[in-house]
Amino acid sequence: MDIDQQIRIIRRGSVDLINEDDLRKKLARGKPLNIKLGCDPTAPDLHLGHTVIIHKLRHFQELGHRVTFLVGDFTATIGDPSGRSETRPALTPEQVSANAETYKRQVFKILDPDKTVLDFNSRWHGSMGAADFIRLGSHMTLARMLERDDFAKRYREERPIALHELYYPLLQGYDSVAMHTDVELGGTDQTFNLLVGRTLQAHYGQEPQCVLTMPLLEGLDGTRKMSKSYGNYIGIDEPAADQFGKTMSISDNLMWRYYELLSAKSLDEIAELRRQVADGALHPKLVKEELAMEIVTLYHGAEAAREARDGFNAVFARGGVPDDAPTWLCQAGDASAPAVFLADSGLAASRGEAKRLVAAGSLSINDEKWNDALSPLPAGSYTIKLGKKRFLLLTVK
Amino acid sequence: MDIDQQIRIIRRGSVDLINEDDLRKKLARGKPLNIKLGCDPTAPDLHLGHTVIIHKLRHFQELGHRVTFLVGDFTATIGDPSGRSETRPALTPEQVSANAETYKRQVFKILDPDKTVLDFNSRWHGSMGAADFIRLGSHMTLARMLERDDFAKRYREERPIALHELYYPLLQGYDSVAMHTDVELGGTDQTFNLLVGRTLQAHYGQEPQCVLTMPLLEGLDGTRKMSKSYGNYIGIDEPAADQFGKTMSISDNLMWRYYELLSAKSLDEIAELRRQVADGALHPKLVKEELAMEIVTLYHGAEAAREARDGFNAVFARGGVPDDAPTWLCQAGDASAPAVFLADSGLAASRGEAKRLVAAGSLSINDEKWNDALSPLPAGSYTIKLGKKRFLLLTVK
């Protein structure tokens, strides 16, 4: 695959690539690159937000590069050495190892296990001596470290920063030196730390790594980031039915975002789906269902996905739109007035019948009674129910 | 010896003792205390300014305590890891060892070799791992470290501070933990670092060390600190004649300071000398000569000291005051007018003869011609010469 195509795939859904020229140079050599993702060795319980980066690693794997998951076990086994924080107890090597296994089980649903290395930074930090530590510190100034948002904030607010905390970003950056990393991935909140790795590699005589940051995935509400604490998440280990139902609940806009960040479909395939929806050839509900199927299949298999879909539609059908409801597309305006689209789509025999049925209270739009036959609906997707048996999946453009 | 007496000896000449209550508690146990002095492993070429602290160690030895010279070889063998400073090349272990031998040769002129331990902090720092380093850093906040004068200044002036530099005071402080130090000595410019040791010992569950700071010794000019770069120093390895002559050149005031800080004489003996000089029983020149003898004897032996004194006096005598010149003390005022003290001391036969001789240009005071017989001299010490053969060592109170 040529470099432009690779760059297009790599950039898909990303926020920042620092920088593209360097990455092109690395790719131009035609050799597999070392891709690194650091992860915390605390007990993982991943939701889809976490998988955005793992899907990106999958892209790199598909492009033939080498992916290493780096478990940051070194500092975890120290815990909070000041003993002030109860939330950071030291982990035993056994706990780290068990957590890594859980992590593997979860991420190997997305990544190819044969092309994924799991490594632990205690391998090199454990044998670092105080002299190595001193040398490491000599490559970074206090002023630069205090540019990191959280340090800057705490310093400004006169909250204590212990000296060892200043070293943590260096240790993380040194991982890239030890691993000869070509590209390191992270969330946008990790940019500072990832750039430390880039700096340190230069100091240690290596070609600096490229940094690729991925966005925080919006949660089901479409506004805040996906997070357990906001309750707007889809967990990897959640039952298939929950995953399916939660996916079906997102907005159409968010659906495209999820496609970009979480789907194995190519950008071209996604563009085609968008086109069909825009043309009215496909109702968004069906596209969303396809996304939900893909997500559940990934974590529970195709069989479980089908069952989840059927279960969901059975419940929904009690509402109840059948699987084979016809779809209809119209322009916002005259054509999107209920009397018009009901007649045009054939759901009602005529505009006159449509008006009478609406006046009689037979129309529901998105499960709500609707009495106005003449005002046009604004652009959007609607589930239309007329009487008890007539359904329409309507898209107003 | 009771604790009050020990405290008096320990406090002699010192600037700060942090704090006396803690030291009294330690002394009250009646066991030998661990006394630490850290020293730089660069090539030593000591002058008397450096020996102020070594004399203080001697006091501790005489009180029965254990003295350890700690050579800070660990960081020296790293040098300047950033490679920015040419003035801090890494020392090889052989260089450190050779420098330590030179150091020993110099300090063992003051200290009792049998009661002095020479240790090297690479012994424990060399086997510290990164985890130990992290823990060490957790005991100190950035804010406190930035209180150190030089860090504060550089940070304010936006000059770079590398992260490892923040760790150096911690490493030095950890030495006290490793050595279970009871009292650490240092110059007043070291107070911050010495207090770090006190803090760390508490964090590591030890009784905190006491900190005793010694002043910077004034140089021969009596104003600026003794320093090679000011040319106002007496070097330990300088020839006996130079040491003697330089000592004789200092002011009377500075002489008492040197006695306090550099002499093996007890405070009581020094007080007695002061009393005799104040009474006019001793001319300050003789007391200064005794100090010069003590200094030269320490570094070159009694024989060399006698030769230096004789050589000095032979040169001075060409000026020339004989060894056995009489001394005279008077009050500032009427009695300190040349006509009066020349007659009263018997150097002139009468006030009349004194006036005539002064008018004839026969009087020199401190080697300068003096024509005023009637104005009193202010308080001070003077070498009086009348004609070619009559001398007087005069003290005006």
Image: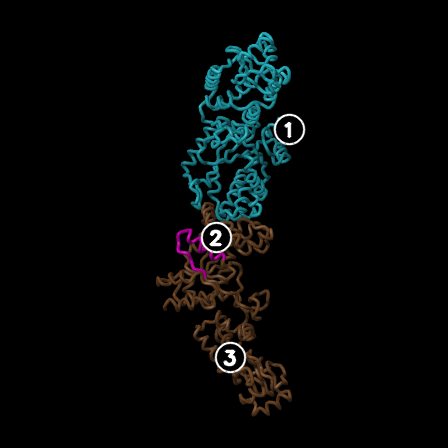
Chain colours: A cyan, B brown
Total tally of numbered discs in the picture: 3
State the residue lying farthest toward the top. A349
Q: Mark 1 points at which residue?
A: A4
The chain letter under disc 2 is B
**Position in image of residue B107 (x %, y %):** 48, 65
The disc, 2 or 3, on the residue closer to the chain's N-terminal end is 2
* Prevalent SS, magenta region: helix
Q: Nearer the viewer, residue A73 or A202?
A: A73
Give the CA distance from mark 1 to mark 3: 93 Å
Q: Give the amino acid at mark 3.
A: Leu
Image position of A391 (left or right of B23): right
The residue tagged 2 is B171
Q: Quadrant of the N terminus of chain B?
A: bottom left
The amino acid type found where label 1 is placed reads Asp
Would you call the spot at circle 1 few (<14 residues within 10 Å), some (14-19), or many (20 or more)? few
Q: What residue type is labelled 2?
A: Leu
| Magenta stretch in the rendered image | B192-211
Q: Where is residue B307 in the image (x, y as percent from the top left)?
A: 52, 77
The residue located at (64%, 89%) in the rendering is: B360
Q: Does the magenta stretch include residue B197?
A: yes
Q: Do the residues labelled 2 and 1 touch (CB within 8 Å)?
A: no
SS category of the residue bearing label 3: helix
Element type at marker 1?
helix
Q: Say which residue appears at 47% left-offset and 27% top-offset.
A: A236
Say what secondary structure mark 2 lies in. Answer: helix
Task: Give above or below for B343 relative to A340.
Answer: below
- At a point 59% along the width and 17% down the height, the residue shown is A395
Nearest the camera: B26 or B94? B26
